[in-house]
Amino acid sequence: MANPQILFEPLLVGDISLPNRVLMAPLTRNRANGDGTVKEMHQTYYRQRASAGLIVSEATQISEMGKGYLDTPGIHTEAQAETWRKVVEAVHAGGGRIFCQLWHVGRISHVSLLPDGRDPVSSSAIRANTQTFTADGFENCSPPVALDDEGIAQTIADYTNAARMAEQAGFDGIEVHAANGYLLDQFLQDGVNTREDGYGGSIGNRMRLLEEVLGAIADFYPTGRTGVRLSPRGQANDIADSDPETLFGAVYEMLSDKSLAYLHVVEDFGSDGGRNPGDMIGRLRRKYDGVYIANGAFDAKSAATAIADGNADAVAFGRPFISNPDLPERYRTGAPLNPQDKDTFYGGDEKGYTDYPFLDR
């Protein structure tokens, strides 16, 4: 069994030096203001967790059209950037590092959440067989329209503007969310992408939007400060591909050539399977030459084993960080974890957000 202390070895991630390998995964908490600005309590929440090797912010929409859930934050206006700047300063004051996760949900949205009641957009006009959270509770996703050339150009411009706003807010880097069935994933996977133009059909065409986004944001964040998140297994938001291993093998190789800060992979959505080096996740792992961050149902022991075996360079933890702001110290000392209050995961106030106890308090 691997020694958990391997989690506390430093790691160079692109241009950023991390003090440990216990990273905080992006966690949607639905506590932003209606205009996409974040609140003062976000400063407390993120600073409390500054001992993570790296914090990846909650998914943050790049435009009004990128929104898909109630009370999620944005990074596309000056006002939003200013409130995020205070969060970044709080994290830095706590000795931490924080990347902003750039997010466009695509078809995983509802007309009530979008400007002027517009239809969601996607790679193709195929409605997602899933629900999203609106002011009226859970509702079926609205039918999308396929992005035309002008819409694609505007989307790339929106990513560029979001990167500019993130730089203005002082984020150490950005993570491009191309996982979990959201817009960039909708272009990658042929279960949704049925286009017959230069953004559909071949794997190269389906990767094109992701490549163009990465090229556009490089004016503000070089590749050494840019990560990408993928989820090759699908399993979220009605996404699927006819040959996921071939598709994602090509995506991994393309991203490997970009010299990114890291590749962040959702390996599993809840069970503790899928990490055998002989299965798809293991085979794909060997196609990426760079810092690899694993995510999905890990604990301290399994994370240490993944790193020791060379299957990951670091591990991102989600729910454990919700209830344990000092998670790295708990893993370092073997201390018990706080129980989770799942009723307060999404929406609400400081309860279940900033009031979980530290070991020494």
Image: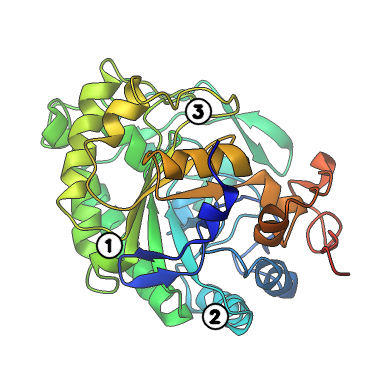
Point out residue 229 in the picture as x, y percentages from the top left corner. 39, 46
Dividing the picture into quarters, in which one does residue 297 lie? top right
Instruction: Please tell me whether residue 262 is drawn above or below residue 68 in the rendered image.
Output: below
Figure label count: 3
Q: Earlier in the sequence, mark 3 or mark 1?
A: 1
Q: In whole angstroms, how far apart are the C-alphas of marks 1 and 2?
A: 22 Å
Dividing the picture into quarters, in which one does residue 68 lie? top right
For the residue carrying disc 2, how many other residues have a C-alpha within 10 Å: few (<14), some (14-19), or many (20+)?
many
The amino acid type of the residue labelled 1 equals Ala
Asked whether residue 119 appears in the rendered view, the answer is: no
Asked whether residue 101 appears in the rendered view, the answer is: yes
The amino acid type of the residue labelled 2 equals Arg
Q: In whole angstroms, how far apart are the C-alphas of marks 3 and 1?
A: 27 Å
Q: Looking at the rendered structure, which numbered label has been put on residue 236?
A: 3
Indicate the quadrant containing the N terminus: top left, top right, bottom left or bottom right. Answer: top right
Residue at 86%, 57% in the rendered image: 351
For the residue carrying disc 1, how many other residues have a C-alpha within 10 Å: few (<14), some (14-19), or many (20+)?
some
Q: Pointer 3 and pointer 1: residues touching (CB < 8 Å)?
A: no
Residue at 40%, 50% in the rendered image: 313
Indicate the quadrant containing the C terminus: top left, top right, bottom left or bottom right. Answer: bottom right
Pick the front one: 99 or 166: 99
Q: Earlier in the sequence, mark 2 or mark 3?
A: 2
The amino acid type of the residue labelled 3 equals Ala
The residue wearing badge 1 is 157
Q: Earlier in the sequence, mark 1 or mark 2?
A: 2
Instruction: Between label 3 and label 1, give the one nearer the viewer.
Output: 3
The residue wearing badge 2 is 85
Element assignment for label 2: helix
Dividing the picture into quarters, in which one does residue 176 lie? bottom left
Point out residue 164 in the picture as x, y percentages from the top left corner. 35, 74
Instruction: Please tell me whether residue 325 is drawn above or below residue 118 in the rendered image.
Output: below
